[in-house]
Each structure stands twice: as structure tokens, then as C-alpha cells.
């Protein structure tokens, strides 16, 4: 009994001051520590290449029901079917080889588990799917003859992504991805090389800017040190002249200050020319970069689809609202630049643009109640029945 009293049966006395008599206490926010000998990689990485792992005090393993209260070192990992399990359950179920998932019965491997980055596993799955699809479907606008083809390509990519995220026709979608990969293998590899070159050019540009900032900082420190030495030297010269010269002290001090101002202006002009040369150098480097050309946007020459193949504009229409405007030969009723045929063309384009849009279902238009007129004089009031 004495051993038990000194062991796990011993209680912990917490005084009102907040100091515990126990030798070790559990921290309020335990850090995630691995209890397995397996190193689980993967996960969603940020711009710096690090994987920020999600952590919550309410975590619980859905298999063994172990929570963070019972196991402060609990660490949950996500499978390829996006179900969470703790490291102990993963070691117990998948150490001997592939085994079915306890939740959905999908065959899983131990090394396929990754750390959890987001609180919502749906977001985790969507980010992983979109990153995978972006590596395969990496065509650019210049790879298509017109904007319509590029928009169709983007719509197809979004359909494939939506199917994979929501588990819709997964086998057929994977077959489409495989077919696209085989047909566009050369273009995919070329675009990957372009992305790598662009990333490398950004790194080089950042390195040049960093070196330029360090150089400017060193020049500023050198200029400040030189200015401090010049002031000290000027002060000593004034003292020496006042001791050895018979001239007026006021004139000597004024002449020394004038010379100091001239030297300071010369230093400022030289430093300004240095900064201008460095900024010119950066602009010339940016102009010489031909990895990603910056083509100026011309708004009125875009290749956009205007539904011109779906209607034919006639010279005249039965349009009573514009009849008075068409009769006005002097243009009194027309605003500057207004043309009736442009209004007709816009109305036709808006009409044919909505032909392929299915009507809304399940929405009922409000039924207008009959109204009655109250009053017979100049003031007429409309009320609902």
C-alpha cells in the first residue's frame, strides 16, 4: 500500500495561489508530437514550403475514440479518402500492409496518410484536387486560337475538378484526365518548364533587389560616416584657424560653414546620382526579361463572342417608342452619339444571349391583387383590395 500511496494513487493538491505540489503539470496547449516511428509527409504547403498542421483541443479519433484529454500527444492524420485517424490506429491497422478504411472500406496504405491543414476536410480535399488538376491542365491563353476555345477549356477543367471533389463519375473522370495527359504530354511539359523559368526569374529578381537594398544601405552608412568625419574635421579646422589667425572670428566661422555646406551638397548630388543609376538598372533588367511578356491590353480589339451569328439586323423595325426619334431629321430629340440601330442591335443581342439559359424552377411570381380608386377629384389614391 505504501508503494501505491507513493505511485499512481497519490493525489495532487492545488493551493488557492495557483501553485501545484505535483512535480509535473500538463500545459494548457500541448504541442503536436509524433508517437509513431513513421514519418508522414505531404500535406498542403504554404509559400515557404512548410506544412502548417491543424490543431484543436476537441480532436478525437473516430476509430478508437481517443481524445486529447486522455492523450495530450494525440495526432490525427488524413487518409486518401479524407477520413481522420490517429497514429496509433494507423500503426495498428496498416503496418502489415494495405488494409480497408474503417470508415468507408477503401483500401489504404500507411504512407498515404498526410497531416491535416484545414479544419474542414472538404476544403482539404478541394485544395488537393485543384493542385493536382493545375499540374495536368496547365494550358495558357496563348495556346488557343480564340477566347471561345480558351473558355471552353476552362469550363471542362472546372467540370473535371467538380466531379473529383464531389465523387461524381470518378472512373470516367480519371479516364478523361489520362486521355488528356496522353494527347498533350509535350505541351504539359513545355508549360511546366515555362513555370519553372518564370519562378526562377522571380527568384533572381528578388535576389537582385535584395543585393541592391543592401548596397544602398551600405552606401548610406558610408555617407553618414563620411559626413560625421567631415563635421568633426571642420570643427577642428575652425578651432585651429581661430587660434592661429588674426582675422575676424565671425568671418572665419561663416567661411567654414559655407565650405561645409558645399561639401554636403556635393555628397548629396553624388548619392542621388547613385540611386538614380540603381533604379535605372532595375528598370533595364525588367525590360530585358522576356520570360513573361507584358502585352498591353487594347479594350476595343478583343476577340469576344457577340452572338452575331444568331441574329440579323434589319434596316427598319416596327418600334413605336423610337418613331418620333427617327422622324427627327435635325437631331433635336437625339442625344450626342445616339443611334436607333445600335439600340435595336443591343436589344437583339440581349434577347439571343438568353436563349440557352433554362428558366428558373420553383419560383412563383407574386399575384397582383386588384386595385381600387378612391376619390373622384384631382387627388386620386390607389389602394389594394
Image (cartoon, rainbow, N blue to C red):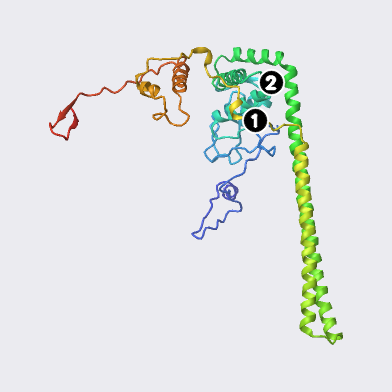
Q: Residue 381 or 226: which is nearer the viewer?
A: 381
Q: Residue 173 or 188: which is nearer the viewer?
A: 188
Residue at disc 2, secondary structure = helix
Quick check: 67 left or right of 286?
Answer: left
Quick check: 337 left or right of 79?
Answer: left
Q: At 53% from the left edge and 15% from the top edge, which residue is drawn?
A: 308
Q: Is residue 138 visible?
A: no
Dot 1: within a 10 Å radius of its alpha carbon, few (fewer than 14), some, or many (20 or more) residues? many
Q: Is residue 118 visible?
A: yes
Dot 2: within a 10 Å radius of its alpha carbon, few (fewer than 14), some, or many (20 or more) residues? few
Q: Which residue is mark 1?
A: 114
> Mark 2 to mark 1: distance in Å?
35 Å
Residue at the outermost right position: 244
**Quarter location, residue 61:** top right
Badge 2 vs badge 1, beta-carbon distance below 8 Å: no
- For residue 264, the mark is none
Whether residue 3 is situated above or below residue 358 in the rendered picture: below
Amino acid at each position: 500500500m505504501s508503494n501505491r500511496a507513493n505511485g499512481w494513487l497519490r493525489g495532487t493538491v492545488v493551493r488557492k495561489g495557483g501553485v501545484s505540489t505535483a512535480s509535473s503539470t500538463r500545459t494548457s496547449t500541448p504541442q503536436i508530437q509524433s508517437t509513431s516511428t513513421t514519418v508522414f509527409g505531404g500535406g498542403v504547403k504554404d509559400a515557404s514550403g512548410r506544412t502548417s498542421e491543424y490543431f484543436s483541443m476537441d480532436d478525437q479519433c473516430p476509430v478508437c475514440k481517443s481524445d486529447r484529454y486522455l492523450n495530450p500527444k494525440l495526432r490525427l492524420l488524413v487518409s486518401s479518402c479524407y477520413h481522420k485517424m490517429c497514429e496509433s490506429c494507423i500503426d495498428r491497422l496498416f503496418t502489415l500492409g494495405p488494409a480497408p478504411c474503417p470508415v468507408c472500406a477503401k483500401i489504404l496504405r500507411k504512407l498515404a496518410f498526410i497531416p491535416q491543414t484545414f479544419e474542414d476536410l472538404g476544403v482539404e480535399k478541394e485544395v488537393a484536387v485543384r493542385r493536382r488538376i493545375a499540374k495536368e491542365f496547365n494550358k495558357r491563353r496563348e495556346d488557343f486560337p480564340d477566347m471561345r476555345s480558351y473558355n471552353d477549356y476552362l469550363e471542362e477543367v472546372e467540370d473535371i475538378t467538380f466531379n473529383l471533389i464531389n465523387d461524381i463519375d470518378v472512373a470516367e473522370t480519371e479516364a478523361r484526365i489520362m486521355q488528356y495527359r496522353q494527347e498533350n504530354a509535350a505541351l504539359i511539359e513545355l508549360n511546366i518548364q515555362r513555370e519553372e523559368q518564370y519562378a526562377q526569374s522571380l527568384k533572381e529578381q528578388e535576389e537582385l533587389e535584395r543585393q541592391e537594398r543592401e548596397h544602398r544601405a551600405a552606401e548610406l552608412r558610408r555617407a553618414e560616416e563620411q559626413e560625421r568625419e567631415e563635421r568633426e574635421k571642420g570643427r577642428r579646422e575652425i578651432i585651429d584657424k581661430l587660434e592661429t589667425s588674426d582675422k575676424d572670428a565671425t568671418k572665419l566661422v561663416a567661411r567654414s560653414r559655407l565650405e561645409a555646406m558645399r561639401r554636403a551638397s556635393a555628397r548629396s548630388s553624388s548619392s542621388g546620382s547613385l540611386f538614380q543609376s540603381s533604379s535605372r538598372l532595375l528598370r533595364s533588367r525588367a525590360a530585358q526579361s522576356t520570360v513573361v511578356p507584358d502585352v498591353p491590353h487594347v479594350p476595343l480589339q478583343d476577340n469576344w463572342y457577340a452572338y452575331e451569328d444568331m441574329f440579323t439586323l434589319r434596316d427598319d423595325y416596327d418600334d413605336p417608342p423610337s418613331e418620333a426619334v427617327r422622324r427627327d431629321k435635325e437631331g433635336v430629340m437625339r442625344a450626342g452619339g445616339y443611334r436607333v440601330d445600335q439600340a435595336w442591335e443591343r436589344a437583339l443581342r440581349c434577347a439571343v444571349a438568353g436563349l440557352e439559359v433554362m428558366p428558373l424552377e420553383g419560383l412563383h411570381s407574386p399575384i397582383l391583387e386588384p386595385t381600387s380608386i378612391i376619390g373622384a377629384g384631382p387627388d386620386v389614391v390607389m389602394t389594394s383590395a
